[in-house]
Structure formats: C-alpha cells, structure tokens
Amino acid sequence: MTFKLKYKNNEETREIPNDNYTINDLLSELGLSSQTIVSKQNGELVIEDTVINDDDEIQLVQIIYGG
Amino acid sequence: MNCTKCGNPKIIIKKEQSGQYLCKDCFIESIEKKVIKTIKKEKLLDKGDKVLVALSGGKDSVTTLEILNTFRTRRIIDICAVIIDEGIDNYRQDGIDIAVRHAERLGIEYMIFSMKENFGITLDEIMEKPNHKGSCSYCGVFRRTLINRAAREMNATKIATGHNLDDEVQAILMNYLEGNTDNLTKLGAKTESDAEEFTVKIKPLREIPEREIGLYVVAKELEVHFASCPYAQQSFRGEISEILNQLNQAHPTIKYSTLRGYDKIKKAVKNDFKKDYPKKRCEKCGEPSANRLCKACSFLEELK
C-alpha cells in the first residue's frame, strides 16, 4: 500500500509501513514539527492524527519558517 | 471526532489549549471573533480611524488586513497599506507582488517604500559591507522608520502590525531573561510614543498563535508568501521560540499564561521603569530622537 507525498516542490510515492500510520508518524519520520506544518489529505485540511490510507495524496504545507 | 461547535466530522484543528475540535468554517469564525474581541477589549480602533497596515505579503500581515477589512466594509475605519522593499534579491519581490495583489483586490490605497530610495542602500548591499552588525538589526530599524514615515504621508491615525501570540510571548520572555525593563515597558496590544510624529501602533493578532494564523490563511485560501528570508539567522529569539514550543507540548496554555501574566504587571512595570527620553531631534533627518542621531542615521553613518 502506498500514498503520494507532496512537500515543497517535491512529489514522491511512499510505502505505508503499518496499519494506523498517521500524518504525525510521517512528520516524525521526516523530522518535521507539526507546529510549523499544516496537512492536507486528498486536498482537504486535516489534523495530524489522521490515518493515511492506500492511494491517499498527502500534502504538507510549511507555514512557519525559522529566523 | 466531530467539530465541538457544529458537529461537522471534517475537523481541521485540535486546539490543545481548550480541548476543542473545529471544522474549517468554525475555525475561521473563531479566529475572526477572537481578533475582534481583542480589538474591542484593548480599544485598538476608534470610529473614523485611518489604519495603516504594514503589509509584507506574509501570513500575519495578510491576516491582519483581511480581518481589519471587515471594519472597513462596515465603514467604521478606513485602511491603507505600506509595503516595505528592503532590497533582498530573489526573495522580497514575491512578497511585494502578493501584497500589491491583496491591496488591489480590496481596493485599498497603498505605497511601496524602498530602503534604496529612502536610505540609498539595500539590505543586500549592507550585507556586503565587512562591518555590518547582522541583517535583522538594520532591517528592523529601517523598516520601523519607513512605516512611521508612511503613516505620516498617508495621514494614518494607527499603524497595525501582524505581531502574533508567539511574537509577543517571545518578546516578553526575552526581555525578562535579559533584564531589559526598558523594552518590557514598550510591549502590549497598543503602544503610544510621547513623540507625536510616531503614530500609535496596534497588534490585533496578539492573542492568536502563529500556527493558527498559518492554518487560517490556508483554510481561507488567501495567497501569502511562505518563504524563509535568506538572511534569517540563529538568534536569541529563535532559541526562545524553540523553548516555548517545547514547553507548549506538555503545557498547551503556557503562551497564554505568559501573556496574561505580563498584562497583569504591565502597568506596574510602566509606572516604575518607563524612561523619560530627552525630546530631541535627529540632527540629520529631523526625526524624533533621544540622541544626536536617530538609530537609522547612526547606522547609515557607520555603514559609510
């Protein structure tokens, strides 16, 4: 089972490693903080507890930049 | 999990500080209501005000403009905008273009003030100087001078900035930790200067967490400039921000309690520590200044 990840200008297809794999799990894997990101699942805003399903398109929008 | 307010199953935020779950529409409404509440509570606006929005094209200033515009459409206030061009290649122009599109979309009078035209130097050129003191010092001082200048040129009665809860709490904590009582007296939702040339500044987003402003612009599909300034540097503010966000995970009300605590002692701090600066003028540009030269002109002298 896979999903498409869109982040900044990149798009990649990733494996869903286990059941109940959430956007929070994905953020941890990518080393990103949910404080600086908002997430969309198939084009709609969702909370980071959302479980990623087969064929989902997950878009991470960085809303806070350091400095 | 459904929206705590309307029962919609499509929630977009879990508010850790209140335990609420909100759908898109209820979230947008909650932000707008909260900003309006701050404006009323802190008496930030008076009927007939002409409010100058310092518009960068970023999420905070675009949100400030968007919500203040509801007062304009109800004919309570008038709005104008100033867009500052610091002169940062491959970065600033995108924000300027977005800011201009917002001003034109809403039919708001705006001016673009550039550092090059006003001070003869861009931030890029400053950063090429061997004796520069770091970009943020110059950017802050020159931008503040230009915003004040724009307010006078456009006859604005208030200047609205996009400072959010995180900005304000970082400033409170930084000044406590540095023992900077002078700067502590200058914080708050509304700041007035003794010099009449300096227009009153207001911070309508002061009680909105930064992340919620980001979510608001995405939820409302407002065009904003999401990008990092190429001169962003590791600063004390950045360290404080990291500490606060870490604390916030286990203590989700900590930013609000810090703000409330400061607001409770603000009056006492001002009474005890507000300095009376000599009311002089900068010898070079004539702006109000406590010293022979104002900060902007003294920077320009150093950079010669």
Image: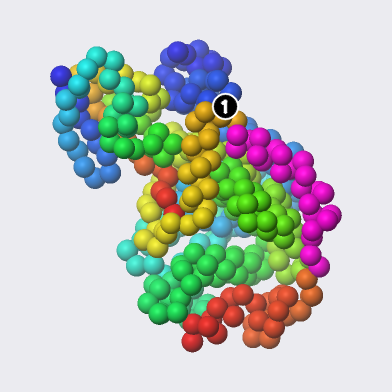
* Residue in front for this viewpoint, B243 or A3: B243
Crowding at label 1, few (<14), some or many (≥20) Cα neighbours within 10 Å? some
> At numbered mark 1, what does the secondary structure look like: helix, strand or loop?
loop
Q: Name the residue under label 1.
A: B17
Q: Does B263 lie within the magenta span?
A: yes
Q: What stretch is highlighted in magenta?
A: B254-276
Count of numbered marks: 1
- Residue drawn at 38 percent across, 26 percent down: A48
Q: Where is residue B2 in the image (x, y as percent from the top left)?
A: 47, 13
- Residue drawn at 59 percent across, 65 percent down: B144
Classify residue B263 by image quadrant.
Answer: top right
Q: Is residue B16 left or right of residue A8?
A: right
Q: Position of residue B47 (x, y in %)?
A: 75, 48
Residue B167 higher or lower than B158, as above or below: above
Question: Principal SS element in the magenta part?
Answer: helix
- Residue drawn at 19 percent across, 38 percent down: A11
Q: Position of residue B21 (x, y in %)?
A: 50, 20
Q: Can residue B133 be seen in this view?
A: yes
